[in-house]
Image (tube, helix red, strand yellow):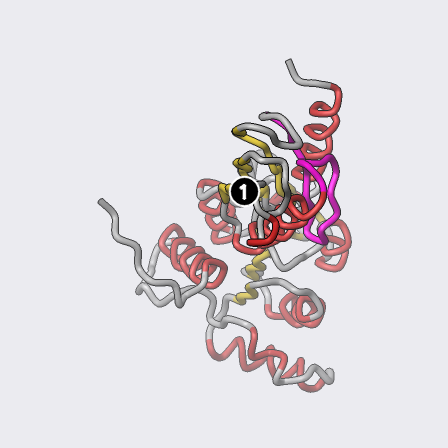
Amino acid sequence: MASGGDQHLLGLLTEAIAGQVPVVMATVVSTKRSVPRRSGTKMLVYEDGTQVGTVGGGALESRVIAAAKDSIHSGKTQLLTFSLLEPERGDPGVCGGTVDIYLEPYMPVHTVFVIGAGHIGRAVVDLASWLGYQTVVTDDRRDRVSEEAMPNADFRHNGTVAEALAEHKVTEDTSVVVVSRAYAIDVDAIPQLLGTPARYLGVMGSERRWQTVRKELADAGVDQMALERIHVPVGIELHAETVEEIAVSIMSEVIQVTRGSTAEPQDID
């Protein structure tokens, strides 16, 4: 049965996950001989190093917090072993025992924010949802963002792009896919999107359409260098023809950018 302290930490963990706040749960998983905390002791560590709970205090805890911050940046779990024997050789304590601490990061779910709820927009939402992403879709046509029309969207917004951005904050853990029905929507949306820290920003359209959009943005005073961060035409070249194939092309590029295109290929047994 969980203690009152553990229930409090689990409640805070639930809040962090719901609020898309990165956090690490540090748990003492095993101990030998004399150590400051027993097995099962937990501590939460936030991205700025703030902690709730304790796994022993002192140099030991400082090292755990530093390692937890690394786990947040890498998104990887860690199992740490500390010997609390000889501080003169760098051990974080003199209790005489050893302790194993498991670090489990809980990271925000990456969001795919789709502007435009036409056939391609729906296909992107469906595929992104299937891949495990959180999905947001916005369109000024109410019937296109109904639950019936967009059953796999986590959040549906009917209205302007500005209203959608105000309601659903775009962060570094957001990829924005613009698949609108008209270039005027793109001209309105792009300056707003350039002001966000979105990790990926892709815009659908032909070369002719993009040149029209770019000219209007230039006439409006938008920095042309800022437009270089936009992936246009959106998606990886797969010679896609069907709506579903285009969605695969788009999500392939989202994955490539968000996961890092320089990663070494992994062997699969």
Circle 1 sits in a helix, a strand or a loop, which is it? strand
Q: Position of residue 58 (x, y in %)?
A: 71, 45
Q: Position of residue 170 (x, y in %)?
A: 68, 57
Q: Quadrant of the N terminus?
A: top right
* Residue 250, picture quadrant: bottom left
Of residues 148 and 10, the one nearer the viewer is 10
Which residue type carries mark 1?
Phe
Of residues 112 and 95, the one nearer the viewer is 95
- Residue placed at 61% from the left, 38% from the top? 26
Number of numbered discs visible in the structure rendering: 1
As drawn, is 203 to the left or to the right of 139? left
Q: Is residue 75 above or below residue 191?
A: above
- Residue placed at 75% from the left, 20% from the top? 4
Q: Position of residue 100 (x, y in %)?
A: 52, 36
Asked if residue 51 lies in the magenta stretch, the reply is: yes
* Residue 180, picture quadrant: bottom right
Of residues 85 and 254, the one nearer the viewer is 85
Is any part of residue 179 visible from this angle? yes
Q: Position of residue 231 (x, y in %)?
A: 50, 71
Asked if residue 158 lies in the magenta stretch, the reply is: no
The 10 Å Cα crowd at callout 1, few under 14, some 14 to 19, many 20 or more, is some
Is any part of residue 146 visible from this angle? no
Q: Is residue 151 above or below residue 183?
A: above
As drawn, is 83 to the left or to the right of 264? right
- Residue placed at 75% from the left, 59% from the top? 162
- Residue placed at 34% from the left, 62% from the top? 264
Q: Which residue is mark 1?
A: 82
Magenta-tinted stretch = 40-57
Residue furthest top as drawn: 1
Q: Quadrant of the C terminus?
A: top left
